[in-house]
Amino acid sequence: MTRLTRVFALMTIAILALVACGTTQGTGGKLGGTVHVLGTWSGAEKDSFDAVMKPFTDQTGVKISFEATRDIDAILQTKVAAGNPPDVTAAPGIGTLIKLVRAGKVVSLDDKLDITQLNANYGADWINLGKVDNKLVTLYAWASLKGLVWYDPKAFTAKGYQVPKTWDELMTLQNRIKSDGGKPWCVALESQAASGWPGSDWIKEIVLSQSGATVYDNWWQGKQKWTSTEIKQAWTTWGQILGSGDSNVYGGKQYMIATTFGDGGQGLFSSPPKCYMFNQGSFITSFFDGYTPKPTAGTDYAVFPLPDVSTANAGAHVVAGDAFVMTKDTPQGRAMLKYLATAQAQDIWVKRGGGKIAINKQVSLSDYPDAISKSLAQVVVDTKIARYDAGDLMPSDMRNAYWSAVLKFVQDQTKLNTILTDLDKTQTTAYASP
Amino acid sequence: MPLTVHLPALQVDWETLLTVNLPTLLFVVIGVPLVLVGYIVGFDILVRRLPKRSQPSVRPWVWVAPAIFFVGLILVYPMIGTIVRSLFDRHGDGFVGLGNFVRLLTDQGILIVLRNNLLWLLLYPGLVLLFGLLLAVLSDRVKYEKPVKSLIFMPMAISFVAMAIIWQFMYYYRPPDVPQTGTLNAILVNLFHGQPITWIQDSRFNNFALIFIGVWGATGFAMVILSAALKGIPAELLEAARVDGANERTIFRRIILPLMMPTIVVVGTTMVIFALKAFDVVYVMTAGNYNTDILARRMYSELYNAGNYANASALAVVLLLAVVPVLIFNLRQFRAVEARR
């Protein structure tokens, strides 16, 4: 038995020695170490993120260990609850993050970033978007624009249609397309577990443009009832876009709920066109690239921002972006966030396309790869009222109920009152908990 | 829809792989077995010091203790925690008794959830058994039994999420004015000249469409086990029946079925438990929309979307209560079979 004990002791020592070897690392003057990042990117977006982070790793020696998940709410909450949070989290929205911030699980950035420099490079709206209870907790690195109407300029010219500048012109165009025997819109709402969100985009754009930023802010903060006049009006306005009995939409309700959002634009490019307009965020071009035959930016498709519903709120746009938070305070994580705020970092992603628009004002318009992304960047520059995607700001149960409500509304518009009352019920519980 | 697959050159970051994982790997591969061996050897020495008479009654406990410890830690402790949690409010500090259950079960939406669970509970095990038995009996009588059985068993190797994605193509909907690319709608439109159906969204069909995906995945499993039971029936018995003039139908009903009953019950109860656990297919395909929600998915959204531990725990307890009778039945059946041997 003594022999076995000796073997055991030797083994233990060997293991301990190996563990010790594994944890020591050469730094060589650079910061070194690793940042564990949790995010949602895969494919082309992940490649872009890698490209953005490469100069950072070269400069500082800090490695990026990236963990991707499409179910970031669940994974992040589990990791935090287990006391094993990632250093940095890149979330598509801050719904889940708000709960974590209030629970004290997110590091405040006020004393971690160079605020003077941030103020110089970032528009005030973009810094304010990162604040929860007056504490800066989130850094936005790049944005995408919502409320964009994609169309085929050839189809428009063939029929003599003009790009609408006002909401009234849009309504007139809608009626003209219909009287010509066409369908004005393509709408595609299917997105697996997130089905319904493209419709929720429509409604939030209408709320912001129709009733203004105050109503919009109160709404996502849970202080504005869904049954209130303003929000209900936004739903009915969307109902007018869809037309009575979905008569304005190609394929009607069945097509809307059964078609994946990425495929929704295909109707624009068939001949004759199945529909003439398609409302979707700037990222949709990466889906257009996957269509056969592949449409060309500029000749096969162009874009105009959804006209202002009310002139009182002219130039209002809903934007979205990747929100970076520090879920654990490490020197490497701080360095990474500082780097992401620079024009150098944002320039890389912008040049790679995919509809991303830089937030840092030092990134010049000439860096955008094509005419369309340049014009989108111009829209962002011209934006007078920028608001973050309300759905992504809401608590995630409110957001999910919102998405489901869109699907119910599309299936039967007459049920709007019941749908909104149910949303009010969710609102009272969703905002109550930490 | 074009499917383009990009295959990136595999870049192996050996440094990260080795520095991060090697010590952990060594610890797991060498350390864990070493601790277990140490535990067994160490305790056996202690047991040997006991008086000879009490050794046989102590030793089994030494061997079973680690298992009991882990089952307690991973299964029993969280279960008790969940039951306790379901009696408190969502912040976990106010005792509300059965309040969570009352609120949940009086909620309008829950009736549809319960109805759907009932559908799963009846149709899923029922159809799996029906198809499994049918295929086991039929394939037993053909020459090419092996390839047939392998093919039918294959879906068993696919995860539920992958099944859901495969079936998304089967159920794919396109408007009536363009060619259908989804298999089912293509058959419907071209062979039967019908209108395409939104299988996943239409509340008349979608629950059956979802359950069928599960049935497709589990039929192979049931078939293999039932087929083994079928082959266990002595050939002389069947021959004797045939000599006595029984026709095939009678043989099946009077001999094969009763002899296979214990296996059928075991497979059936396993499927009932699977049906109660169903989550992935609904989560991936509809996220509970269009009246397809089920308890397990609802529990998930209460936990991760709403952060409502009280509601989530209460739903977990409801599921647990539903499983308990099945488990008891299963155990009894198992004992009865054992006793017959």
Image (cartoon, coloured by chain):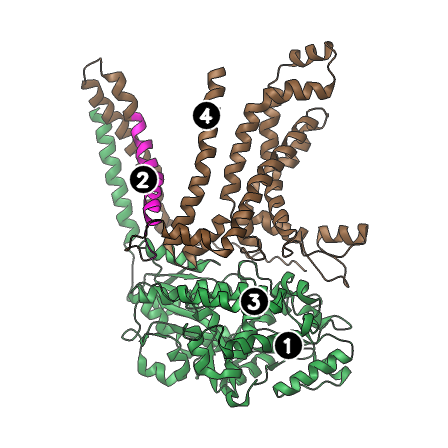
Chain colours: A green, B brown
Q: Which quadrant of the view contains residue B54?
A: top left
In the image, which is nearer the foreground, mark 2 or mark 3?
Answer: 3
Figure quadrant of the N terminus of chain B? bottom right
In the image, is residue A348 above or below residue B59? below
Disc 2 from disc 1: Cα separation: 57 Å
**Identity of the amino acid at label 2?**
Leu
Q: Are marks 2 and 1 on the same chain?
A: no
Q: Secondary structure at mark 4?
A: helix
Q: Which quadrant of the view contains residue A157?
A: bottom right
Disc 2 from disc 3: Cα separation: 43 Å
Front-most of residues B48 and B314: B314
The answer to whether B272 appears left or right of A156 in the picture is: left
Task: Read off the residue under disc 2.
Answer: B73
Task: Read off the residue under disc 3.
Answer: A406
Check whether the beta carbons of the residues at disc 4 and disc 2 lie within 8 A of each other.
Answer: no
Task: Read off the residue under disc 4.
Answer: B332
Residue density around tag 1, few if under 14, some if 14–19, many if 20 or more, within 10 Å: some
Disc 4 from disc 2: Cα separation: 26 Å
Front-most of residues A128 and B193: B193
**Identity of the amino acid at label 4?**
Arg
Residue density around tag 3, few if under 14, some if 14–19, many if 20 or more, within 10 Å: many
